Every structure is written in structure tokens, then in C-alpha cells.
Image: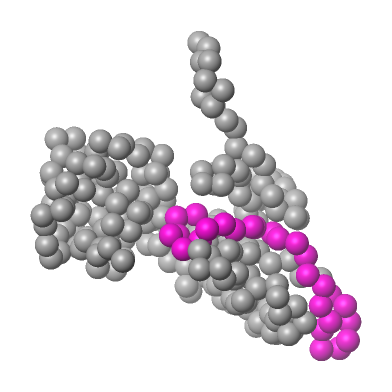
Amino acid sequence: MFNEDPNYYIPLAPSEACRKVGLGSNASNRGFLPNGTGHRWVGYESFLERDFLTILLQHPEAEFFQEQPETVTFIDAEGNARKHTFDVLVYLRNGQKIAYDIKPNKLVVRSQIEIHHSLIKVQHPNYADKFIVRTDLEISRDQVRNAELILRARTLWDDQAVEHLRQQIASMHGRFRFATLVALFDLQADGFNAVLNLIDSQELKPVTRGRINDNTELEICKAA
């Protein structure tokens, strides 16, 4: 079958990481995620990085991010030149840049990563506005699962279903359960994805914490 539309299929571009991410052995924790917005692959070097990037891919304030950005050279406390590659450099929609390192909490002190961040901040003040370490204590499975749901719903966007939901909630007030909105559709799958799409576009907001499910309470976001 041949499609004359040149945009019928466009393969994802390779990762733009400055440090090559290799897959290694079958036991390797390295791999790649599809970035639909940037239309490229995103490399990760641990399961924790993968989880952080999954959350980042659906974050509404993240306009762009670079995994494994350009290496920074800094002088340590002993006067030695050292090199450091951040795990992710995030460009926010408000113009800020945030440099992240992702580490298991048990390795933060031993790695001296927070000391390195403080030195880089002084020596390279224009590299980023903030320097942050994220650990497994801040990256929850609920966050990852919710991000996965939203990212999947993006690939299933249906203009008709989304518009139908918008019309339905236009006259609604207060809070309502996720399942209540899904029930507005003849096909539950259409309703399920449409609700996630409006959460993604910040037209609906979960007001109960935790994993998104039928009992999650939602409210309509007021226009700015």
C-alpha cells in the first residue's frame, strides 16, 4: 500500500544527548522513550531516569528538554578541574532553565552531587536558573503511571470526542468523578481518553491526589 502524503509516516529522530546512550546487555537499565512533541527519541541510563523523563514528557510547563546536555567543566574544592554532565536540562515556558540530576536517594551524599551543583552554580551562573537533584523519594509510581496514561491518550486524540466533552462540561459546576464524565459517552474508551486529553490541556484538574482512576475527583479549570 502506497500513500502519496509525504507526512504519512515520519520516523522519530535520534536522541540529541551529548553523551551516547548505549543499550549494553540484556540486563542494562538503559533505553529510549519516544518524544512525540519533539518527534525524537529520548535516551535514559537508569529506570529512575526513565520514570523522571516520562513525567517530564507530559509536564505542561516543560517547553523543551535536553537529556545528557553539553558537559560542564568546573573546579572542585581541591582546585582540580572536573567534568559533569547533567541528566536533563529543562527549558520552561516561563523562560527559566533547570538543570537536573537523577539519583537514588542512598547515593546522593556519597556522590557529592549537591556540592558539585553548588560549585557549578557559582562558576557557571548562566548555565541554568536552578540546579536540582531528584531522587526516588520525589518520583512516585503514581506520578509515572498518570503520565503514562496521559501520554498514551495524546496518541489517541479525537477532535470529536474532545469537543463533545467540552460542550458537556460547559454547563457543569463543582467537582465530579472521572467515571461520571466517561459515562457521558456511548463508548467508554472515547470518554476515558477525552477526559485525559482535557487534563493534559489543563482544562480539567484532578483535585484528589494519587493515581488517576474512576473515583478521581476533577474540577474545571478557570480560564486565565
- Residue sticking out furthest to the right: 80
Magenta region, residue range: 57-82
What residue is drawn where x is 67% and y is 42%? 14
Quadrant the C terminus occupies? bottom left
Residue at x-position 28% and y-position 57%: 203
Q: Position of residue 76 (x, y in %)?
A: 82, 84
Residue 25 falls inside the magenta stretch: no
Tell me how the rendering is colored.
one colour
Res 27 visible: no
The vertical placement of 99 against 78, above or below, is above
Q: Name the residue rendered at 36%, 54% in the picture.
A: 200
Between 53 and 135, the one lying in front of the other is 53
The one nearer the camera, 167 or 77, is 167
Of 224 and 35, nearer the camera is 224
Residue 180 falls left or right of residue 47: left
Residue 11 position by quadrant: top right
Residue 44 visible in image: yes
Q: Nearer the viewer, residue 120 or 6?
A: 6
